[in-house]
Amino acid sequence: MLNICLICVGRMREKHYISAFSEYEKRLKTYCKFELIELPEVRLPQAPSQAEIDAGLAKEAEEIEKRIPSGSYLIAMCIEGSQLSSSDFAGLIQKCANEGKSRICFVVGSSFGLDKCIKNRADFHLSMSLMTFPHHLARVMLAEQIYRGIMINEGSKYHK
């Protein structure tokens, strides 16, 4: 069975995002082992300097590193990543399974992104869009796309 781990920096507080995410989490658990790990975002000043941002990202990266499951195919969510269609994303999930990678770990950084050490460690860089979305909406969108990808691979009618 496929194992999906989603490591996210920051906690969702908005009820509508929590509700939407929970729906896809419930659906995913029917088809795979799904785990969400939420890590605290490092607190930064109101107008942080680049050095403060870099130090915060480095601290977050230390916590992320501890939580990445061993043997995972690591996908870093970052703006400079590749943009895939839903069908191509499903193909990436299927490719992992075909190559014996039954564990896929997605990492969503804080509002300032991910430290370069996590990006360097990643097997793949994925971007949702060139557009900017609320940070927690992107998490919901990722959960939906993981579900959609699994449904495409199952031959379901969910993907139209």
Image: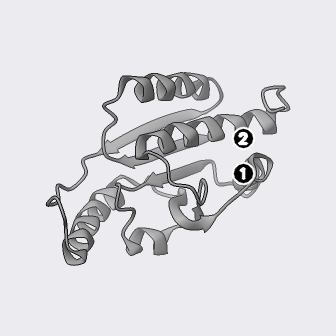
* Residue 122 at least partly seen: yes
Q: Which residue is mark 2?
A: 149
* Number of residues whose C-alpha sits closer than 10 Å to that of mark 2, classed few (under 14), some (14–19) or many (20 or more): many
What residue type is disc 2 on? Gly
x, y percentage for residue 88?
78, 53
Closest to the observer, 122 or 43: 43
Q: Is residue 115 left or right of residue 90?
A: left
Q: Which residue is mark 1?
A: 89
Q: Residue at x 21, y 77 (%)?
A: 51
x, y percentage for residue 73?
57, 58
* Number of residues whose C-alpha sits closer than 10 Å to that of mark 1, classed few (under 14), some (14–19) or many (20 or more): some
x, y percentage for residue 82?
65, 65
Asked if disc 2 and disc 1 are in contact, CB closer than 8 Å, the reply is: yes
Quarter-wise, where is residue 115 in the image? bottom left
Q: Residue at x 39, y 56 (%)?
A: 109
What residue type is disc 1 on? Phe
In the rendered structure, which disc, 2 or 1, sits on the residue that comes first in sequence? 1
User: Looking at the figure, which quarter contains the C terminus?
Assistant: top right
Q: Is residue 117 left or right of residue 28?
A: left
| Vertical relation: 131 (above or below) 147 | below
Q: Residue at x 17, y 55 (%)?
A: 43
What secondary structure is found at the residue carrying circle 1?
A: helix
The furthest residue to the left: 45
